[in-house]
Image (cartoon, helix red, strand yellow):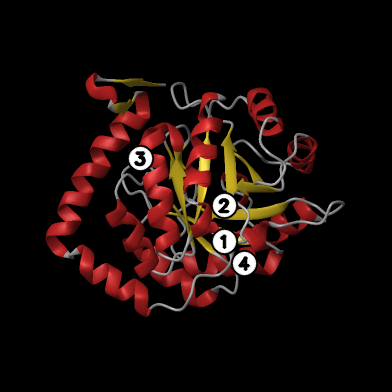
Amino acid sequence: MSKMGRNQEYRPEGFLATMAELQAERVKKAQAEVALEQYQALAQATPPALDFAQALTRTADGPLRVIAEVKRSSPSKGALAPVADARALAAAYMQGGAAAVSILTEEAYFHGALADLQQVRPALAIPMLRKDFLIDPYQVWEARAYGADAVLLIAALLGPAKLTEMTGVVLAAGMQPLIELHAPAEVAWAEAAIEVNAKGYGDRRPVVGVNARNLMTLQVEPAKAWELLRALPNHWIRVAESGLRTRQDLMAAREAGADAALIGEALVTSGEPSRAIAELIR
């Protein structure tokens, strides 16, 4: 999935390599329009972020907490739903019992937009996650300025050193990262990122997700995901990601040790997102 070049420089492969190049271009363009200092000033003037970790904490015998996703399209399935009103969809998710809402802001493959964050924030009393392929601290401050409470950090996209750096930036911005893993080797990367930034976490539990989607083939591999979830430390809040559609799927994730599940496609295509979440967590 990845390789080290000369001087031990980490380089993602496959779809993530494509995304890394695309994101680098986007950051360069965005910086020419809005300086980092402007976003940092806006972030500092924004109300404090809601507690993402607390929202995902469940009781021992309780159902999984659901992170419901505003998602229009995906590389594997193409167009899923038009989602003309992200605010209304997010509000429906909250009404149905979602613990947090994920907003996909990637444009080319997922048809998302940063503006969705700004539109959705006033409608929510629960945390909002910016889900994107973040590679630069600029994007972290951008997310906070737009009202995000948490952001996704993909270990296989960033590599071990960058993951540690970006984790620190997220915490410094007042948010919390959802560190996403795909392979057993990445568990040690997450452990290092969390340990180095322990002071920034304070009393908050780290939130770490396992994505069941193979980023080379884009196929969902639940058995591998359950195995990786079982290998994560119990004191982490563990999130199951991708391919979750039914209560049976959530029960399997819970049996593997998950505390929460990130669900997008099954909700946006349900026609009744609020009822769909309520059915999943009843």
Q: Secondary structure at mark 4?
A: helix
Q: CA distance from mark 2 to mark 4?
A: 11 Å
What residue appears at the point 42 percent right and 57 percent down from the top-left corner? 170
Q: Position of residue 220 (x, y in %)?
A: 58, 27
Q: Position of residue 106 (x, y in %)?
A: 36, 48
* Sooner in the amino-acid sequence: mark 1 or mark 4: 4
Q: Which mark is residue 268?
A: 2
| Residue linked to disc 4 | 92
Q: Nearer the viewer, mark 1 or mark 4?
A: 1
* Sooner in the amino-acid sequence: mark 3 or mark 4: 4
Mark 2 residue type = Val
Q: Front-most of 62 and 76? A: 62
Q: Position of residue 240 (x, y in %)?
A: 64, 40
> Seen in the image, is 151 located left or right of residue 282?
left
* Sooner in the amino-acid sequence: mark 3 or mark 1: 3
Mark 4 residue type = Ala
Q: Secondary structure at mark 3?
A: helix
| Residue linked to disc 1 | 202
| Residue linked to disc 3 | 162
Q: Position of residue 147 (x, y in %)?
A: 42, 69
Q: Nearer the viewer, mark 3 or mark 4?
A: 3
Q: Residue furthest left?
A: 32
Mark 3 residue type = Lys
Q: Nearer the viewer, mark 3 or mark 1?
A: 1
- Residue 99 visible at all: no
